[in-house]
Image (cartoon, rainbow, N blue to C red):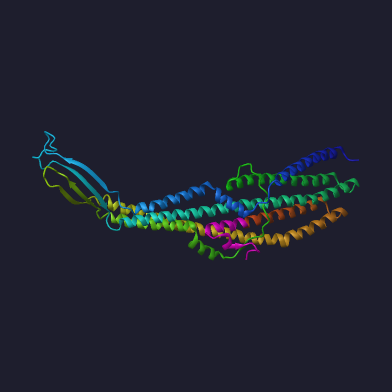
Amino acid sequence: MKEPGLITHGGLLFMLTLLAVFATFCFGAMQVQADDLNLQQLIEEALKNSPNLRASGYRTSAAEYRIPQAKTLPDPMLTFGYQNEGFTKFTYGNPNNANTQGIVAVAQTFPFPGKLALKGEAASKESESMGADYDALRLKIIAKVKEIYFDLFSTYKNIDLINERTSLFTHVEDAALARYSTGKGSQQEVLMAQTEKYMLLEKETMLRQKVEALDAMMNATVGHPADAVLGRPADLPPANLIYSLSELITMANEQSPELKSLDKKINEAEIKVALAKKDYYPDVTITGSYYPRGNNFEDMWSLTATINLPLFEKTKQRQAVNEAEALLSEAQGEKDSARLMIASAIRDNYAMLKASDKLMSLYKDGLIPKGLQDVELSLSGYKTGSNDALTVITRLKSIIDYEISYWLQFSEREKAIARIEAVTGLSGAAINNRKGNSK
């Protein structure tokens, strides 16, 4: 006859089981409404729907429109006027006043040779810099989609794992109940096995909540409604990194959109230094005037040239050159800093990738298979009375931790590769393939 405390505890566990099964059923019913997630499709949707990427594209287009403006002459000036003789009366039409006349003048300013070309070149470099910023943002969006995708992937794998391993705790529970019913085991062993099984159900519930959070992040990233139902990520083999650390850093220095953008900003700053030095030289304004006089007086015309005199060059032109040179130094410093940060990021993610490779191999080829054998032996020993329940449960918890860690490392590995792709400016097809493990 079972003790009353055990029956009460068993009833509570039975209710928890029903709740866990109900939650699992609802979650599964929601998931079957959606197809499996396709990574490439998600990336395409994110790039298509990203408001930040669209805004960056418009900024690039606006910069392109500034190029022809910068290379064009200033608008010509048209002047209308009238010249009167004296202040006492209006002398227009008086045949005795030869100096009474209308005035029509056209003026065009011509910047000093080379200025317009430099302005156009500076605008072109600004546009190219914004185009590189667009490419960098595009790669960051792709990397973000991949990171969320692989977090979802590992979370689903761990949910599957918990569902599979719960049966092992059920075997331990059954064995504990059998030993208890025959008087060979204690009530504490039964409760211990039941508690560990329901702790797995607690962990499963937390993982399903994590799925909900990741689904919300993915919907926001790809532009879906917040309540859109997403499917389960499709199984993907590990990506294959085909470059060494030094090769990746070299490629980043050559192809990183972020560094390309800063290169263009340096070019633009260099051009602006040259343009500021050009302001030491005057611009020329040519004015052509026509004076219709009438009353048998011959019409008159004039052609004049006007130049600006840089008399305040110490406080104006020279300071403008100093400003431009300071901005150039700033742009060069920003590139040096970005290059160091990118190299550091590549090294960090490369180390994470290699560590994940080793850990995954350790879990897959060593700890997990050995641990499963150990669990089977300890469970058999427990049934025969040679082991206690604590030994079986401890080893079973260890194998679950190893398997969960395997999928977490798989996720971290794929996320590291995605971040390397983003900072190096290489496409997924160029940097890896999915036909085997990384070297």
The residue at 30%/58% (across/down) is 114
Quarter assignment of residue 367: bottom right
The outermost residue toward the front is 296
The outermost residue toward the top is 88
Please check the rendered image and state whether residue 418 is part of the magenta-colored stretch, yes or no: yes
From the viewer's perspective, is residue 293 above or below residue 142?
above
Q: Nearer the viewer, residue 210 or 175?
A: 210
Q: Nearer the viewer, residue 42 or 215?
A: 42
The part of the chain drawn in magenta is 414-439
The outermost residue toward the left is 96
Report the quarter where the N terminus lies.
top right
Q: Is residue 379 left or right of residue 232?
A: right
Q: Is residue 154 left or right of residue 253?
A: right
From the viewer's perspective, is residue 59 above or below residue 96?
below
From the viewer's perspective, is residue 87 above or below residue 363?
above
Give residue 397's position: percent from left, percent from top: 75, 52
Q: Is residue 230 left or right of residue 88?
A: right
Please check the rendered image and state whether residue 424 is part of the magenta-colored stretch, yes or no: yes
Give residue 206's position: percent from left, percent from top: 69, 45
The residue at 39%/58% (across/down) is 267
Total number of numbered discs in the rendering: 0
Give residue 215's position: percent from left, percent from top: 64, 46
Report the quarter where the C terminus lies.
bottom right
